[in-house]
Image (cartoon, rainbow, N blue to C red):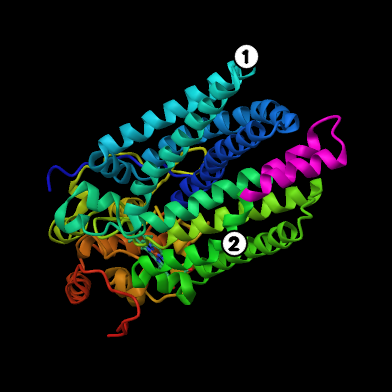
Amino acid sequence: MDSYFHYPVNDFGPLMRGMLIGGVAIFHVFVAQFAVGGGMLLLLFEWLDRRGERPLLRRFVGGYFRWLVLVSFVLGALSGVGIWLTSIQVSARTIGLMVQEFHWVWATEWMFFTLEVVAGYAFYRYGERLGRPRRLQLLALYAVSAALSLFWINGILSWQLTPGEWPETGSLWAGFFNPSFWPSLVYRLMVCATLAALAACAVVHRIPGLEAEERAELQRAASPLLVPMAAMPLVGLWFLVTIPADSRGWVLGESVAMTLFLGLAVAASTLLGVYVLQAVARRRLHVDLPTAVLLLALAFAATAGGEFVREGARKPYTVRGALYANSLTPEEVAAFRRRSTLRFHDRYPLREGPFRTEVRVPTDQVARGARVFRHQCSVCHTVDGANGVVHLAGTWSLEQQRLNVAQLQRTKPYMPPFAGDERDVEALVQWLRWRIAGEPETWPDTSGDRDVSHRIHAWLEEAGTERVAPGRPQERGR
Ligand code: HEC
């Protein structure tokens, strides 16, 4: 355990750290999936044009593509780097584990991404001068490499939620082709196609000099990409069946926030689906600009809701069974019970807020508590902002606070077991009470109270270091 490395973490209050990375990731997923769908759409148009002389479609491919390149490459690349930048500050160990396990998978994914960018740029720069077969080949290269980069990243992302046989066997391929690999890949590909087709429906209104009939022709040409959407509810169900029962339970009612987000995703995609399918069925797809923008906004809501659910359903893990959200492995939790975490060099100053103000603490015990909070809780909680502990535990009595922190996994099953000894629990509770009391200048030091230590020790022992599977009856009282 001496090899445990204590990474410095950054504080982004009033947002909790997990929310920050979630926000950047949702934006990135939206743009990146749009880029994949854009490849499909361009390939479809180019192919339709080749089959039967459709100059309008060819013009669209040339014009629309510049826009696509600009939006999805620039924003996709920026937000992609943004994910790395935020995640090393929020959860360096999760990223570390992902890199360590999937080194060559990342390399493969980046190779396809490079191919996608090169093919896309080559088409953008030289497309006009190339003959038809070459144009089609270049677009096929773009579309296929974009879809393959999704294929590779999807394995890593779905592994976090359903690592399959990987924890037992350590096999890379068991982790990669894990239980939720296929449903999430199919689902994402459908989302990609939908996003691109909807964006096309909006963009046709921005092309100068188009007649209404021409706009309708372009929208009809894009509509095949909207059809797979009809299968989304089924694929969504398939996904729900493959995820662990406890995660499914939270999504389906046990966690209000997650159920709301799932509801948002389902409602938004159903609305979209019904609207588009009836239009396609009547062969009268004609989407005006406000509707197209509204549909895109619904698609964004569905993406955001879906990603939130996917991230949230992993709790308390970032890699199920292997790494808790606070970057501790189950083995480390057990080890830190025996030897307190604070020996493991959290030497970083206690600072808070956007201006990195130094926190002035009255006692060493409170300082220790602040570090325990930063280490174990701050990824999911802020002090008094989003999911703030001061609000959550502010009305509890002293003994309740001690008990509920010592038995954290019983307090709420989305939380990992407490990783520290009785002195860490007491320090955290004293820090919490000091914050609730409004940070007075003096504060009693209870670290010498042996009765308290004994009680907390007994509670820690009783709860053990195993995670509680939700749904089981939880004894909370004494
Ligand atoms: C994996 C994320 C995660 C971690 C890590 C985590 N929590 Fe929580 N915690 C939650 C969630 C989610 C809730 C539920 C919030 C709600 O019900 O609104 C919660 C609820 C709570 C509550 C209220 C419980 C209740 O019954 O009302 C307290 C107090 C709390 N956490 C304290 C802590 C402390 C102290 C730590 C660190 C030792 C911690 N949490 C670590 C996610 C986490």
Q: Nearer the viewer, mark 1 or mark 2?
A: 1
Task: Please tell me in which quarter of the rendered image ligand 1 is found.
Answer: bottom left
How far apart in space, not on screen, are marks 1 and 2 (Cα)?
38 Å
Q: Residue shown at 69%/29% (left/top)?
A: 58
Q: Residue shown at 37%/35% (left/top)?
A: 109
Residues at circles 1 and 2 in contact by the CB criterion of under 8 Å:
no
The residue type indicated by label 2 comes to Ala
Quarter-of-image position of residue 52: top right
The residue type indicated by label 1 comes to Arg
Say if disc 1 is inside 8 Å of ligand 1. no
**N-term mark: 1 or 2:** 1
Residue 250 percent across, percent down from the top left: 43, 71
Quadrant of the frame with the C terminus? bottom left
Image: magenta residue range: 199-224
Residue 14 percent across, percent down from the top left: 53, 50
Residue 193 percent across, percent down from the top left: 57, 47
Q: Which residue is mark 2?
A: 230
Horizontal placement of 197 versus 421: left or right? right
Dot 1 falls on a residue whose secondary structure is helix
- Camera-nearest residue between 410 and 430: 410
Quarter-of-image position of residue 477: bottom left
Q: Which residue is mark 1?
A: 129
Q: Main secondary structure of the magenta part?
A: helix
Taking 414 as reference, is 62 above or below it?
above
